[in-house]
Amino acid sequence: MTSKLIFLTNPIHPLVHAEMETFARVSVAKSTRDEDLIAGAREASIVVVRTPIPAALYDQAPNLLGVIRHGAGVDMIPIPEATARGIAVANAPGTNAVTVAEFAVGQMLSLAHRSAAANQRVRASGWASARALADDGIELAGKKVGLVGLGAIGQAVAKMCHFGFGMSVCGYRPSGRASLDFVEVTALEQVLARADFVVLACPLNESTKGLISRALLGKMKASAYLINVARGAVVDQQALVEALTEKRLAGAALDVFTQQPLPIESPLYGMENVLLSPHMAGVTDDSLRAMGSSVARQARQILGGHLPDHLVNHESASQVQQHLARQLGKS
């Protein structure tokens, strides 16, 4: 088993990297350009994904057994093309849910109390100018948070807001089923229209791409805030910029964007009521270790000829199992 190669698109937690080296060779991509990802994966049995990979990678990786997402969202992986080849696709769901939820709630607090804006203004304009921002601040207590997505992240946000701040919680999930008894599950339009804070925590797929449209943004209260810790493509970003510019929304906290990095010419940079972060909501030392441990465990399972704990293309499990048997039988 030690001859097998695990290829990392990006560095992972050093302790997890060291753990992987006890049962396989490990290499890291020179860069995240497609040509370097393809070149680095040529001899790989496992690819660990922290950046989008091209479908062409599969054609150049004849030994590939599995592709494992270092995190929950699998929009970075061309899944149909992997499934067609019998390649296992896995992820690490729930391992950074609390991390993302803490970040989202922290951004809610910063928007409500104007703390990030005050930090910038006290440095640039002085004490009195910064302190004046507090006059427009609000409290989370007694407000309503609306969740778009009630998976592990959405549920973690709901618990923090409800039990920590006494907020009422409503949410939208396609199944329409309530996951927590204090969450009112309702239509998407109602979530946006009634919430003081809307938190986007849904995966990106065909049904959620462009989900928060211009029309739905128009349903939100002018005093409401939008927090996006999902994916940039879930929102019509141009419509959001216009709503913020025209003060049809009080503000936003955006961790993800339709184009990343966010282009320097974006008007979002100049908005004091918008908090920007570089897709970091799910990243801490703690979460990197948790995600990495799940990935390492599943890599070991695949290399041992077993289906991983969190097989994403589970509808093709038998095909994946046959591919594992064929490939490992050669070695």
Image (cartoon, rainbow, N blue to C red):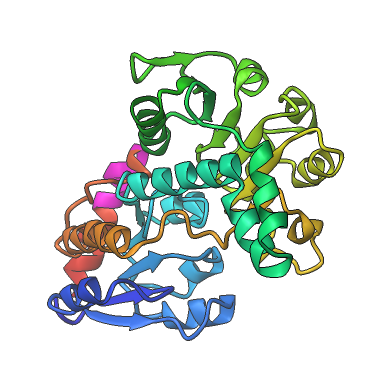
Q: Position of residue 331 (x, y in %)?
A: 18, 75
Q: Residue at x 65, y 63 (%)?
A: 122
Q: Residue at x 52, y 51 (%)?
A: 75
Can residue 233 be seen here? Answer: no
Q: Residue at x 67, y 55 (%)?
A: 130
Q: Please state if 166 lies on the left or on the right of 263 as rendered.
A: left
Callout count: 0
Q: Main secondary structure of the magenta part?
A: helix
Query: Height in image: 250 above or below 330?
Result: above
Q: Is residue 284 magenta?
A: no
* Extreme residue toward the front, this view: 128
Residue segment shown in magenta: 315-321
Query: Height in image: 68 above or below 39?
Result: above
Q: Please state if 205 lies on the left or on the right of 91 as rendered.
A: right
Identify which residue, 3 or 206, lies in the foreground.
206
Identify which residue, 153 or 164, lies in the foreground.
164
Q: Position of residue 282 (x, y in %)?
A: 42, 54
The quadrant of the picture occupied by the N terminus is bottom left
Query: Height in image: 46 above or below 211?
Result: below
Q: Position of residue 194 (x, y in %)?
A: 63, 18
Q: Is residue 319 magenta?
A: yes
Identify which residue, 145 or 9, lies in the foreground.
145
Q: Residue at x 82, y 37 (%)?
A: 247
Q: Position of residue 93 (x, y in %)?
A: 33, 45
Q: In the picture, residue 214 is in which quadrant?
A: top right
